[in-house]
Image (cartoon, grey):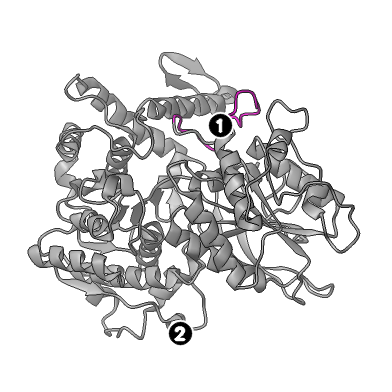
Amino acid sequence: MSSEVLLERKNNVVTNGELQSSKLSSYETAMEKLSSLITRQRRGEKPPVPNKLERMSTYLQILGLEEDINRLNIIHVAGTKGKGSTCIFCEAILRECGFRTGVFTSPHLIDVRERFRIDGIDISEDKFLQHFWDCWKKLEEKATEQLPMPPLFQFLTILAFKIFISEQVDAAIIEVGLGGKEDSTNVIKEPTVCGITSLGMDHTEILGDTLGQIASHKAGIFKPNVPAFTVPQPPEAMDVILERAKELMVPLEVTEPFDFTQLKGLKLHLSGDHQFYNAALSVSLSRCWLQRTGNWEKKFPNDFQDSNLPDEFIRGLSTAHFSGRAQIVYDSSPSSDCSEVVSENCGGELIFYLDGAHSPESMEACGKWFSNVVRGYKIPSHSSVGVENNTVGSSENGHILHERKTFGQFDNSFRRILLFNCLDVRDPCILLPRLVNICASSGIHFSRALFVPSMSKYTKVTSGASVIPSDLGGIDLSWQFNLQRVWEKIMHGKAVTPSLENDFKISSKETLPPHEFLYDNVSNGFPSHNYSARSAVIPSLPLTIRWLRDCVKEHPSIRLQVLVTGSLHLVGDVLKLLKR
C-alpha cells in the first residue's frame, strides 16, 4: 500500500505528511468563518435582530431540519446559575441509562467543539468540520440582504441541531444561551421536558432589572402541556414562573435540594453546595424524560421511589464533568512552560482553583466552594502517595485532568492568591466584596490579588491549537487598574496610590513584580518589599502563569493556592495555558 494518502480539497492533492496541517488549516478556516459572524455591538447591548426566532425557523427550513428537531426528545434548560451543570448532569444520567446523548452548552472554554458533546465527549474535529461546512455552504448560498448569515450564537445553535439530528442521538439536552423567551434555542416547539435553574440578577441590561422581569424571560421556554421543573426561587421570581405555567397548563414541580445519602457513599462530581439543587433538578428532568419517552418502565420495571435512585442515576451524578466550574488543577511542573496538568508526583506547590463565576450569586457560591476545599486540603504525608480519585475529563491532545485525594496533616502555609478579571459590564464593587466576605466568614483570606486581561477576544473564535498572543504592545489595562482600585479599597479602605499604578504601566521596563511581592510578611524570613499594596496588575496571562511558576520554583517551601474567577473566558484561557 502506498505511503501516500491522497486528500482532495479545493483541487489540491496533499500527502500523508501534509494531512495534519491541512486539517488544521481547514479547522482554523472554520474558526475564521465563525469569527466573521460575531456582531459588532458592545457586549451587553441588545442586538438589533428583528424577528430572531422567525429567522431561526427560516435557517432551519433551508437546512431541512425544522421537522426533525421535534423528534430529538429535547430537555430544554434555562436559568441564571447552574443551567450548564444541570444539562451535564442530565446527559451523564441518560448516558448511563444506555442512551445516545447530545448536549449543547455555552460558552466554550478552550475550543468551540466543547459546546457539542456526543455521548459525553466533545465532537471530533472531523465530524465538526463535516457538519460545519454543510451548514455554512447551504446558508451562504441562500444569504441575502434581507436574510444575512446568522450571528454567531444562532449559527452554533443551528449547528447543534444539525449535529444531533445527523448523529441520531436519543436525547438532546439544550442549554439556553441568554434569557429564554427570545433566545435562539427557543425555536424548539415540542420539548420533552423543560427546566429552570436558580434565578438571580444577571444580564439586567437585556432581561430587565427585576427578578420578575428576568423570570418572565426564563419561563418563556415553557410550552403548552409540557412538564416543567424548577428549584426553589425568590418569591418575586416564583410568582411569575407559576403564573406562566398556569397560562400554558404546564405541569410544574418544584424540586427540593438533593439528599446526598441517595448517592450510597459516592459524591457529586461537580463540587459546591449549590450543585445539590442542580442535581435534584437533573434527576427530576431525567426521570420525566424517561417516563415521557416510554423508557422508564422498560429500564426500571421495579418502580424506584424518590428516596431510592437507580444505580444508573448515581453513576451519572458521581461522574459528570464540566470544565471550569469548581475545578481543581494541580500544576505538576511549575518551572516548566509545557507541564502536564496533573501528576502522581505533584507536591501541591501550585494549585489552581477555577470557577467561572461572574454574577453576585455565583460569586457567593464560588467563595463557599473555595473556602470549603482549601480548609479541607491535606498535604501529602511522607508515607502516603496521592490517590487519583476519578478521571474527570480528557482531551484529544492526550492531557487528562484528574481530581486527586491526598492524605496527611492539615497545612496552613499556603498563600491564597486571587487571579481575577471580569467584563466591564459587570460591577466589581459588588462581585469582589461578595467574594471576600464569603471567604472571610470561613476564615479564608487572600494574601494577594492579581488582575490580568484575558487572552480571549470577543471578536475572534479560537481553537485549542490557536497561537497564544505574546505581543504586549497596545494593551489597554485601564479596566484592570480599576479592578485593582476596588480591591485596595476593600483591603485598606482606600484606593491604590497613583505611584503604584505607574509601576505597572506597559511602558515600564519592569512589567512583573518581584517574586518577593508574593512573600512579603511571610514568617519564614523572606525579605519584605516596599510595596504597600496587596495587589498587582500584570499585562498578560501567559506572563502571569510563568511568573507564578517561577515564584514557586525559587521558593519551593511555599505553596500557592490560586483562585481563578470572574470570567469563564479567563478560566478557559488559564486551562489552555496549563495544558500546553
Q: Which element is circle 1 on?
A: loop
* Placement of 196 over or under 138, stated as above or below: below
Query: What residue is pinned by disc 1?
Result: 466
Instruction: Name the residue nearer the viewer: 367 or 91.
Output: 367
Would you say 546 lies left or right of 19 here?
Answer: right
Q: Is-magenta flag for residue 463?
A: yes
The residue tagged 2 is 261
In the rendered structure, the answer to whether residue 38 lies left or right of residue 238 reads: right
In-front residue for pair 339/379: 379
- Point out the image quarter for the N terminus: top right
Q: Is residue 367 magenta?
A: no
Magenta span: 459-476
Relative vertical location of residue 168 with respect to residue 130 in this rendering, above or below: below
Q: How far apart are marks 1 and 2 (CA)?
A: 44 Å
Q: How crowded is mark 1: few (under 14 residues within 10 Å), some or many (20 or more)?
A: some
Whether residues under marks 1 and 2 lie with C-beta atoms below 8 angstroms apart, the answer is: no
Residue 434 shows up from this direction: yes
Question: Label 2 amino acid?
Answer: Thr
- Residue in the image at 30% along x and 28% along y: 136
Q: In which quarter of the image is the C terminus?
A: top right
Residue at image coords 17%, 59%: 222
> Which residue appears at 65% of the width and 66% of the height?
404
Residue 109 left/right relative to 508:
left
Q: Residue furthest front?
A: 494
Measured from the top left, where is residue 214 in percent x and y? 26, 55
Q: Nearer the viewer, residue 367 or 343?
A: 367
Question: For the residue carrying disc 2, how many other residues have a C-alpha within 10 Å: few (<14), some (14-19), or many (20+)?
Answer: few
Can residue 326 be seen here? no
Q: Quadrant of residue 120?
A: bottom left
Task: State the image coordinates of residue 457 (x, y, percent, origin top left).
Answer: 49, 33
In the image, taking residue 95 as reference, residue 323 lies left or right, namely right
Location of residue 517 with respect to 7 vertically, above or below: below
